[in-house]
Image: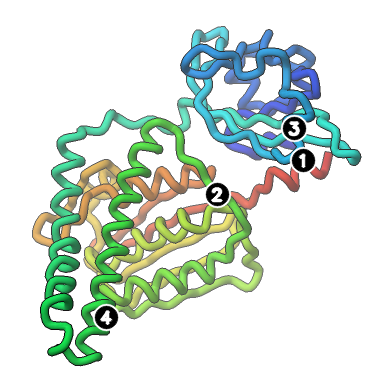
């Protein structure tokens, strides 16, 4: 088996002349055959969306790569037997022991892995505007009060107001982040800043933050003894967990919540289980759909949290799923692959 076959994206290894020396099964399918031994320009002629060749004369000169190790995520158009295909390209340059360029590894995200209907800009603006109004009103009210009555307010009152302003500013920042994530996910331009992450620490931080809005939150974090750190974007993992925990509090129950972390088959498995009313069989397949709201009588939010969360998990190469039993509760589970590209490269 090819050492890159574990990865969900098409992966090509190139030598210093941009000749393909290794390709996984996904790459064979994407390129319509065996590309080994052929220059990448001859196989698929990768170009940027504006028509410029990605590798006009092979890989860049070694002198330009002294301080560069990564190939930054960028959209690329490939010429394949099936026609032109748009993908997202990223990867790493390879050097020998003397630091000289000896090739590169290129990851090509297949367009079939994730597709979504186009966003409705009016619906997005309307929904997010409504969500922004509440924290901004709070910030405006408290800052106005502090400015006009500073000398008449007690220190504990000032502290309470400033803490609320800080909290509401975080809410606004998070909403703006979600807006940016929508755009990046739609265009396939989401960039992950991966590092080794201890999900146990992320879960504890999420519970602490959510408890500020949900004082009744009673959550247990259960981590298996054999759990290791995972190579992921810590901010995105926190964003996913925050969405799941907040949803559990709003639509399930803030008490009896359990966040479990364990090892699966080549992946880390994280689940958030509540003891709420559960989700009906009719609604369960819809919960990851953009703008879906299953109970308008309860706090609705933007209807984007689960859609964005699934996109963030899939960008890591994982999956986000939901199971539910009415009257018992709901469990959301996501996986993060235990695959480190640099570790794979070091083996060969």
Contact (Cβ within 8 Å) of mark 1 with mark 4: no
| Relative vertical location of residue 85 with respect to residue 173 in this rendering, above or below | above
Q: Residues within 10 Å of mark 4 (few under 14, many from 20)?
A: few
Q: Residues within 10 Å of mark 2 (few under 14, many from 20)?
A: few
Q: State whether residue 327 appears in this view.
A: no
The disc placed on residue 215 is 4
- From the viewer's perspective, tell me whether residue 127 is left or right of residue 272: left
Image coordinates for residue 340, horizontal then vertical, percent = 68, 48
- Please tell me whether mark 4 sits on a helix, a strand or a loop: loop
Q: Residues within 10 Å of mark 3 (few under 14, many from 20)?
A: few
Distance between the alpha carbons at the discs numbered 1 and 3 = 12 Å
Chain-order first, disc 1 or disc 3: 3
Chain-order first, disc 4 or disc 2: 2
Chain-order first, disc 1 or disc 4: 4
Chain-order first, disc 2 or disc 1: 2
Distance between the alpha carbons at the discs numbered 3 and 4 = 51 Å
Which residue is label 1 attached to? 345
Which residue is label 2 attached to? 193
Camera-side residue: 157 or 310? 157
Distance between the alpha carbons at the discs numbered 1 and 4 = 47 Å
Which residue is label 3 attached to? 2
The disc placed on residue 40 is none
Q: Residues within 10 Å of mark 1 (few under 14, many from 20)?
A: some
Camera-side residue: 162 or 105? 162
Residue at point 15% right, 68% down?
138
Numbered disc in front, either 4 or 2? 2
Chain-order first, disc 3 or disc 4: 3
Residue at point 63% right, 38% down?
7
Numbered disc in front, either 3 or 2? 2
């Amino acid at each position: 088996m090819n050492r890159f076959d574990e990865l969900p994206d098409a992966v090509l290894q190139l030598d210093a002349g941009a000749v393909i020396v290794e390709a996984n099964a996904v790459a064979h399918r994407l390129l319509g055959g065996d590309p080994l031994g052929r220059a990448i320009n001859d196989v698929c002629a990768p170009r940027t969306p504006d028509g410029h060749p990605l590798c006009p004369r092979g890989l860049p000169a070694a002198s330009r790569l002294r301080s560069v190790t990564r190939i930054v995520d960028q959209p690329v158009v490939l010429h394949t037997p099936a026609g032109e295909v748009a993908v997202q390209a990223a990867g790493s340059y390879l050097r020998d022991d003397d630091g000289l360029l000896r090739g590169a590894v290129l990851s090509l995200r297949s367009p079939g892995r994730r597709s979504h209907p186009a966003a409705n800009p009016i619906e997005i603006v309307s929904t997010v505007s409504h969500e922004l109004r509440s924290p901004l009103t709070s910030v405006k009210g408290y800052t106005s009060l502090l400015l006009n009555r500073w000398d008449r307010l007690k220190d504990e009152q000032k502290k309470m107001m400033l803490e609320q302003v800080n909290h509401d500013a975080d809410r606004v920042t998070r909403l703006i982040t979600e807006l940016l994530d929508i755009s990046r996910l739609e265009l396939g331009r989401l960039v992950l800043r991966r590092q080794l992450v201890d999900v146990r620490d992320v879960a504890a931080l999420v519970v602490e933050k959510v408890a500020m809005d949900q004082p009744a939150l009673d959550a247990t974090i259960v981590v298996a003894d054999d759990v290791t750190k995972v190579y992921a974007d810590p901010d995105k993992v926190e964003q996913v967990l925050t969405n799941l925990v907040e949803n559990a509090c709003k639509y399930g129950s803030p008490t009896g919540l359990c966040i479990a972390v364990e090892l699966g088959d080549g992946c880390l498995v994280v689940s958030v289980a509540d003891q709420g009313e559960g989700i009906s069989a009719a609604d369960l397949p819809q919960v990851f759909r953009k703008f879906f709201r299953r109970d308008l009588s309860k706090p609705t939010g933007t209807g984007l949290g689960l859609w964005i969360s699934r996109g963030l998990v899939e960008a890591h190469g994982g999956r986000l799923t939901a199971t539910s039993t009415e009257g018992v509760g709901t469990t959301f589970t996501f996986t993060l692959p235990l695959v480190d590209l640099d570790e794979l490269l070091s083996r060969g």
